[in-house]
Image (cartoon, grey):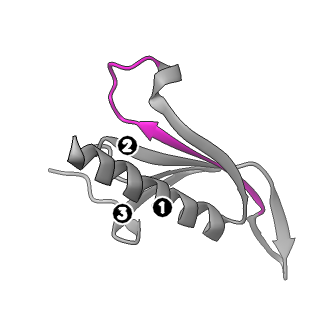
Amino acid sequence: MAFTAPLTYKNRPLVRMGNQIYYGSMTDPCVAYLQVLTTKTVDGVEEADRVHVSLLATDQKLPPAQRLLQQGNKTGLYAALEIATIWLEHALADAKKQ
């Protein structure tokens, strides 16, 4: 039975464990990895403040240093997911051209 992620964002699966989030499908050439670095409390609710975003190749044959395609920091989870979406769309479109 295939894994179905319970959460999606813009029709891509989101898998979260603690302060780590994987965005995208592992069957695609790349996925986004988001790590919440700091949080802040707003109206009694803890939310992500600084988030590190990485675009990773899913090819297990590549060494770890070559699997890292892009990275950067964003303020807020929404901004991090938006940049991850843009990076994923560009990387997947480039992979289809090849």
- The numbered mark, 3 or 1, whose residue comes first in the sequence reads 3
Left or right: where 40 falls relative to 23? right
Report the residue marked by disc 3. 12
How many marks the image carries: the answer is 3
Q: Nearer the viewer, mark 2 or mark 1?
A: 1
Name the residue type under label 2. Answer: Cys
Q: Position of residue 65 (x, y in %)?
A: 53, 21
Marks 2/1: CA–CA distance: 12 Å
46 part of magenta stretch: no
Marks 3/1: CA–CA distance: 12 Å
Q: As drawn, which residue projects farthest toward the front?
A: 97
Report the residue marked by disc 1. 86
Dot 2 lies on which element? strand
Q: Residue at x 40, y 68 (%)?
A: 8
Dot 1 lies on which element? helix
Report the residue marked by disc 2. 30
- The numbered mark, 3 or 2, whose residue comes first in the sequence reads 3
Q: Residue at x 64, y 67 (%)?
A: 79
Q: Position of residue 10 (x, y in %)?
A: 39, 72
Q: Position of residue 94 (x, y in %)?
A: 31, 48
53 part of magenta stretch: yes
Q: Nearer the viewer, mark 3 or mark 1?
A: 1
Name the residue type under label 1. Answer: Ile
Q: Which residues are magenta?
A: 49-63
Left or right: where 24 falls relative to 40? left
Task: Give 62 or 26, whichever is nearer the viewer.
Answer: 62
Name the residue type under label 3. Answer: Arg
